[in-house]
Amino acid sequence: MLHLPQIQPRTPAEYHQMAAGPDRRWYRPLLVLLIFAAIFIPLNVFVTVIPAFIPSIATEGYLGILQGEIDTTDPIVLAVLMFSLIAMIPAILVAVTVGLRMGLGYFFSVEGRLRWKWQFISFAIAAAIFALFYSPIFLVLEDVEWNTPGNLPLLIVMIFLLVPFQSAAEELAIRASFLQIFGSWIPHRWASLVVATLSSAAVFSLLHGSLDAWILLDLVIFSLAAVFLMWHTGGVEAAIALHAGNNVVIFVLEAIRGTSTSLISAETTSSPISVGISFVMMGTVTLVLALVAKKMKLTRRHNPDNTPKPDPVYLYNNLSKGRYFEEWNDLYPAYVLQRAGIFPSRLG
């Protein structure tokens, strides 16, 4: 079996403790990082580089990507950019399943599944609030020349189809994985949460490329809000909604305006005013999502009774080491007990 039945704690626990059960081992999080890199790097290179050899795709806009000039109003550029990041999804899902040995559903939430209803509701809420905040800034306040492209309908469709997956990729690979990794390494509930929060915030901020203090602070605020939502709601859905709502609204407004200036690069800078506005936006969205989650009575802690059941191989391997699980007594086949030198009647 890929998952280990006791990788989840044997008592009710929060999202970041889903890999902190008796089956955890210090080396498994390292395997997650190695497997993720081994899958993501080739996929990222494939998505980014291969189009250069296809004449119909290797447009002037695409060639600009290789030079660090990204025009998201070009459909080819937008697709390459999104898929190069979406490649993190299969990489982290395989890495967590094989490396951390947890049931994949528990990587999404404490209920052992992606809560689709909550995912769609939280995205709709986040996107609506961000639209209210960003629309005046992008369409009225900023003094930027408009150049609405003729392919606007295509761009909007692509944005709604691809950007949520790009956002989910970053949340799963950077935030959710950090919570599970440090939750596995550090058994203490609050210590693991604090370390994971600070580490993921630092990595998320630095990966965007800019070392401007205000940009970094803005990204840290974003990261803290996302981690809080994962912890508070018991899953990744609200954090993905926060990220996707923000990005979708920005990309749509930029597509309407015909500009591509919001992507962060090494030269990007910000200001205290911008950070203040961002703080208010993120705080508002986070507060509303937290209140709605409470209203919907989302489960914040997993139920150990729903832990995936073990197979005979797992039971035999543990039994041969002297570990017998009374709660799974009925799952022990007679041949497993016999191979371990124990008669079924002795365990009745």
Image (cartoon, rainbow, N blue to C red):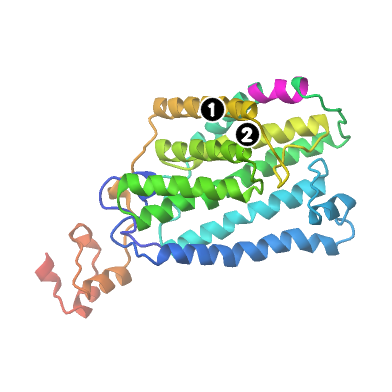
Lateral position of residue 125 relative to residue 197, left or right: right
Residue carrying label 2: 246
Q: Is residue 39 magenta?
A: no
Counting residues from the start of the chain, the first of labels 1 and 2 encountered is 2
Count how many numbered circles sit on residues in the image.
Answer: 2
Looking at the picture, tell me which residue is in the foreground, 300 or 222: 222
**Residue drawn where x is 41% and y is 62% of the image:** 101
- Numbered disc 1: secondary structure: helix
Name the mark on residue 285.
1
Amino acid type for the residue under numbered disc 2: Asn
**Residue drawn where x is 67% and y is 42% of the image:** 163
Looking at the picture, tell me which residue is in the foreground, 143 or 157: 143
Quadrant for the N terminus, please: bottom left
Residue furthest out toward the left: 346
Amino acid type for the residue under numbered disc 1: Val
Q: Please, what is the dominant secondary structure of the magenta stretch? A: helix
In which quadrant of the rendered view does residue 312 lie? bottom left
Q: Is residue 343 above or below residue 114?
A: below
Lateral position of residue 168 relative to residue 20, left or right: right
Where is residue 289? Give x, y as percent: 49, 29
Where is residue 65? Give x, y as percent: 80, 53
Looking at the picture, tell me which residue is in the foreground, 322 or 259: 259
Q: Which residues are magenta?
A: 133-140
**Residue drawn where x is 86% and y is 28% of the image:** 146
